[in-house]
Amino acid sequence: MKTITIGLLLPSSTIVPMGKDFERSLKKSLRENLGDPEIEIEVVSEFIGQGGLVKVEEAVSKLLAYDNADIITGIVSNKIGMEVAEKFERSKKPFLINNIGEHIPDPRSYNQYVFINSTHTWQQIWSLGYWAVKKFGSRGMFVGSVYDAGYAFTSMLKLGMEAADQECSMPFSIAPVPAGEKTADPRTVFRHIEEFKPDFILSVFCGEEAGIFQKEYITRNYHKEIPLLALPFLLQPFDAEGNELELYTTVASSAEVEPREIKLTELNTANPFSSLGSETGLILAEAINLMGSGSLLDALKKVKVHSSRGLLHIDSSSPAKNNKVYLVRNTYSGDVSAISMDLMEELETIDIDNKALSLWLDQPSSGWGNPYLGV
């Protein structure tokens, strides 16, 4: 009997059980799709805290040197993935990264041993920014907490807006975390909203902060005055006081289907980590089934796995290839079980080799490497 050892990198989160959901779904999917009963799977989990570089490097070193893992996967940001990519080239072991795409993946920093399974949020925010300028005007505002501001969200919003109008402006407001507190107070951004009077707002608050922000948005009557754009993580429960809040998000899919066939409830979610785990289980199962007497690396290069997002493209040399981005209008009164989701239209999007994006990749960026929600 042949044994394949899979190393799992699992971050923690005070917002959603991202690591637990990912691990449970991966194991279930892998178990249900493995074809050879003579192959024994050993899963070794390493907990990486918030997913920073030091923790990830320590876990990867242990999994490669002590556990002799045949492959390592888990939830790791693109930025940290780039930092540890060389370890996998030296060991000649594959690394399958999973994330929502909070950092832009730079293909130049990866190698043939690194694969990426992601919802590519960076790409979707570019599309939102481009669409919003064309639809609402050239003055868009970014709001979020100090944690959320450390990702590529601001840069991608600005790049999308500039692609639509070079004369656009993007004021922003970042809610700090008060001394002794664990979360920011989103209400602090509203004085800046009043000051800047933007044509639209992108809010990237999540968890408890998201609910507070939405309630204040309605209290101040902005839901009737300023269009609200967001990541699906803003779709949290809150007291709408009898009002309805409308906000725009996006979903990405490579599926060659009519837009009406896209499964919004599976894609437009505040907790995508279970789906990422299931997809990774499918990818690993197919690779192991294809491997035969060859290498797992070569098998990974041949997998063709479909999920609710369409054909999964995991090649780190061309991330988000063939993705289509669709606009979703969400309407609800604070009850997350009763959100009305309407697929509106396909949006203009961006490829990883876009000239403006390539120039941005060469600029200094935030040192915040954790996966989104890894706090």
Image (cartoon, rainbow, N blue to C red):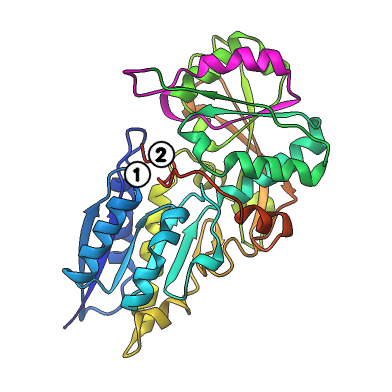
Q: Is residue 288 magenta?
A: no
**What residue is shown at x 33% (from left), y 38% (from top)?**
13
Badges 1 and 2: C-beta atoms under 8 Å apart?
yes
Q: What mark, if any, has residue 18 been given in the picture?
A: 1
Q: Is 180 above or below relative to 155?
A: above
* Most distant residue in the front direction: 364
Q: Give SS at disc 1.
A: helix
Q: Within 10 Å of the Cα at label 1, are there few (<14), some (14-19), or many (20+) other Cα atoms?
A: many
Camera-side residue of 238 and 151: 151
Quadrant containing the C terminus is top left
* Most distant residue in the bottom direction: 293
Q: Within 10 Å of the Cα at label 2, are there few (<14), some (14-19), or many (20+) other Cα atoms?
A: many
- Image x and y of residue 363, in percent: 61, 51
**What residue is shown at x 38% (from left), y 62% (from top)?**
84
- Image x and y of residue 22, in percent: 34, 51
- The CA distance from mark 1 to mark 2 is 8 Å
Mark 2 belongs to which amino acid?
Leu
Q: Quadrant of residue 168?
A: top right
Residue 313 visible to the viewer: no
For marks 1 and 2, the one nearer the N-term is: 1
Mark 1 belongs to which amino acid?
Met
Residue at image mark 2: 373
Residue 19 visible to the viewer: yes
